[in-house]
Image (spheres, rainbow, N blue to C red):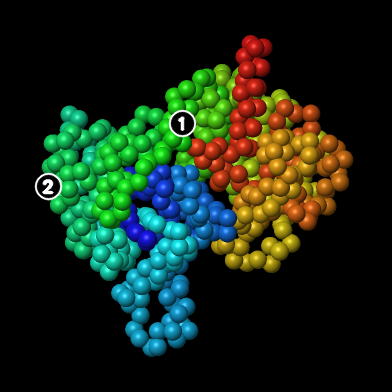
């Protein structure tokens, strides 16, 4: 069967459409249905690859190398269906495809219009996801933006057409709105009424309302909302603020029978629900004992979503290890002006961090601060985890401070360095276009025996996702390994270095790939788990010594 659920939002942005859509997907998977997720982004960019992390958060990379919106990261963490470039649709992609077809003469001279040509292309891409496998049951389509935005109208019109063409037993609308709280703790339903009215003016009657509210709504308020929005009483669902974690949201929706209501409206027989993994995850959350502090030293610290998957992967590892993770956000550029890093990372700052993580990034700003943080972790024997740029920083720091190669650097930051220990990939030298041209997507790595990486994965061959242009320079491989730096993983042909480790160190690992993209709350990534285990051990050792 092919059933479609269109998730839209109203009143304002950042209400949690992605979490709501993902939670519904998790519940349907818990009932044995095969679910596929699709994100429709109204921006005209072809993809998220060239967008600023400050403006749009992290870029989530799929196995096939698509650079997508961070909501696909939510889909990956909540659901198990495969994600690829097909699951991310932007206005830029749609118009690009239609214009290419027009230039090729495929429209036979007809005038190209939003309806039907743009909406037809949107529908074609959504249906393509549904038809990827005969086993697909439900496609959940999240429409980005807010109802009323001019950019979202073509996607909402495509949704309206699909609901009309397929019938309400095959396609339904789920609309997320806000119930604000004003002075005196009074909850207001009027914004929700106006939001649904805006949807109705576009020809879409929501079948289910999800009301974002600071508290659970009483029955009288829910009846009032149902009456004024033409939605059944039982179909008014409340997404209230949880004081635990966003991963409780599927269980909050389950208690209100969101998945049963959706299946009923689509004429699907309700199967037994198995949510044991989610209940087990919440049991682990409630059973956490103790807290450890990890300093995340990065370039884009002002916006939490810039490193969304990294923070979530640390949280997942904390669940697996039974501890609460306190993330200390440290701007790497500011570290460059600090005379003594102990005043920030060590006991001089009052509460020292128990481990350091340096995530990915682009550009020269703050790199020296990252290198200083790496040097601090290496010499203080504190657990260190470098991801992408974080691994390259390990290599640069080792060259400068162990090998004494003055001003060793990456050619990304210094074209005239005497020691370019990190350099541009050969196939990137003549690349002029910025979008979608890096080393992207899933790649096979071979892990050396006797390394921390092998201990974490337990496997000799691993598959992880990449997003970068620069690599460890093979010209300096002998000098690095001769001085003690451990290379713990290579590409299948031994041509590229995928991971390095510090010798005689409790846990100092850098990887060129992005393991955070594969971590889930119900299945923490083994590399993050190994890092947090080392952090816990370091914290216990310092506590024992009274440090």
Q: Is residue 280 left or right of residue 544?
A: left
Q: Quadrant of residue 182?
A: top left
Image coordinates for residue 66, horizontal then vertical, percent: 54, 59
Pick whichever, 399 or 498, lies toward us: 498
Q: CA distance from mark 1 to mark 2?
A: 38 Å
Residue 227, numbered circle: 2
Q: Is residue 248 left or right of residue 236?
A: right
Image coordinates for residue 73, horizontal then vertical, percent: 48, 48
Residue 521 seen: yes
Residue 280, numbered circle: 1
Residue 150 seen: no
Pick whichever, 285 or 370, lies toward us: 285
Above or below, 180 against 102 in this view is: above
Image quadrant occupied by the N terminus = bottom left
**Residue positioned 53% across, 25% down in the render:** 322
**Residue positioned 30% across, 74% down in the render:** 115
**Residue positioned 52% across, 30% down in the render:** 319
Residue 179, numbered circle: none
């Amino acid at each position: 069967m092919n059933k479609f659920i269109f998730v839209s939002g109203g009143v304002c942005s950042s209400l949690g459409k992605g979490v709501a859509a993902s939670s519904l997907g998790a519940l349907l998977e818990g009932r044995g249905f095969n679910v596929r997720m699709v994100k429709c982004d109204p921006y005209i960019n072809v993809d998220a690859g060239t967008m600023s992390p400050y403006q749009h958060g992290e870029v989530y990379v799929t196995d096939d190398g698509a650079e997508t919106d961070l909501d696909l990261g939510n889909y990956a963490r909540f659901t198990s269906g495969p994600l690829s470039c097909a699951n991310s649709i932007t206005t830029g992609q749609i118009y690009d495809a239609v214009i290419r077809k027009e230039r090729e003469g495929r429209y036979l001279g007809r005038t190209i219009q939003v309806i039907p040509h743009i909406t037809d292309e949107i529908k074609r891409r959504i249906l393509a996801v549904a038809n990827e496998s005969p086993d697909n049951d439900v496609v959940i389509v999240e429409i980005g933006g807010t109802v009323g935005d001019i950019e979202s109208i073509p996607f909402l019109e495509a949704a309206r057409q699909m609901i009309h063409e397929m019938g309400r037993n095959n396609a339904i609308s789920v609309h997320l709105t806000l119930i604000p709280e004003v002075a005196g703790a009074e909850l207001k339903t009027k914004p929700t009424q106006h939001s649904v009215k805006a949807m109705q003016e576009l020809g879409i009657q929501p079948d289910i309302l999800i009301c974002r509210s600071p508290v659970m709504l009483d029955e009288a308020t829910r009846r009032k909302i149902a009456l004024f929005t033409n939605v059944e009483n039982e179909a008014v669902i409340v997404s209230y603020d949880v004081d635990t974690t966003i991963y409780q949201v599927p269980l909050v929706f389950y208690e209100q029978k969101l998945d049963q209501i959706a299946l009923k409206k689509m004429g699907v027989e309700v199967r037994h629900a198995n949510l044991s993994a989610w209940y087990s995850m919440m049991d682990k959350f409630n059973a956490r004992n103790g807290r450890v502090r990890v300093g995340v030293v990065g370039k884009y610290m002002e916006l939490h979503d810039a490193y969304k998957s990294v923070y979530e992967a640390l949280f997942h590892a904390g669940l697996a290890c039974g501890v609460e993770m306190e993330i200390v956000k440290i701007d790497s550029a500011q570290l460059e002006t600090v005379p003594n890093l102990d005043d920030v990372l060590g006991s001089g700052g009052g509460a020292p961090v128990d481990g350091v993580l340096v995530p990915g990034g682009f550009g020269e700003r703050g790199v020296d601060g990252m290198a200083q943080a790496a040097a601090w972790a290496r010499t203080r024997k504190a657990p260190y985890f470098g991801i992408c740029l974080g691994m390259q920083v390990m290599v640069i720091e080792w060259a400068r401070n162990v090998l004494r190669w003055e001003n060793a650097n990456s050619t990304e930051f210094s074209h005239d360095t005497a020691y370019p220990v990190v350099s541009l990939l050969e196939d990137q030298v003549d690349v002029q276009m910025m979008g979608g041209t890096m080393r992207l997507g899933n790649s096979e790595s071979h892990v050396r025996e006797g390394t921390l990486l092998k201990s974490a994965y337990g496997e000799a061959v691993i598959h992880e996702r990449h997003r970068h242009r620069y690599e460890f320079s093979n010209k300096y491989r002998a000098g690095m390994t001769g001085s003690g730096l451990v290379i713990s993983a290579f590409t299948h042909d031994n041509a590229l270095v995928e991971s390095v480790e510090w010798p005689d160190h409790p846990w100092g690992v850098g990887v060129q790939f992005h393991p955070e993209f594969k971590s889930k709350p119900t299945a923490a990534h083994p590399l993050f788990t190994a890092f947090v285990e080392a952090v816990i051990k370091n914290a216990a050792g310092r506590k024992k010594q009274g440090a």
